[in-house]
Amino acid sequence: MKIALVTGASRGLGRNTAVALARKGIDVIGTYHSNKVEADAAVAQIAALGRKALMFQLDSGKVSASPVSVSTHPSRPLRKRTSTG
């Protein structure tokens, strides 16, 4: 199983990249800045290709406030935080 992380995956070049990867059989974890409607549409487009997709809102200027944490431990590489603390 292959999974790609695509920043800005809700629109423009990022979305085109995410969809192209999905067409090649790769699942996508994407980020978007503020447009949840576009992010949800990108997820639906990728799902229509038979691939899995998740989108997380991320302001790259405020990474410490992100609801996502990434670990280098292979058994738990990605998880949502339950609080912002």
Image: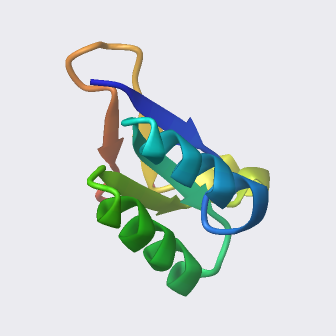
Position of 59 with respect to 18 (left or right) is right
Foreground: 42 or 71? Answer: 42
Report the residue at 44% width, 39% height from top.
69
| Residue drawn at 45 percent across, 45 percent down | 23
Q: Residue at x 70, y 60 (%)?
A: 59
Farthest residue to the bottom: give it. Answer: 37
Task: Find residue 58 and report its image quarter.
Answer: bottom right
Could you tell whether 80 is left or right of 21 in the image?
A: left
Q: Is residue 8 visible?
A: no
50 vs 63, nearest the viewer: 50
Asked if residue 18 can be seen in this view, the reply is yes
Q: Is residue 17 left or right of residue 71?
A: right
Across and down, in percent, residue 39 comes to: 52, 72
Q: Is residue 44 above or below residue 19?
A: below
Question: Where the N terminus falls, by quadrant?
Answer: top left
Q: Position of residue 3 (x, y in %)?
A: 39, 32
Q: Quadrant of residue 65?
A: bottom right
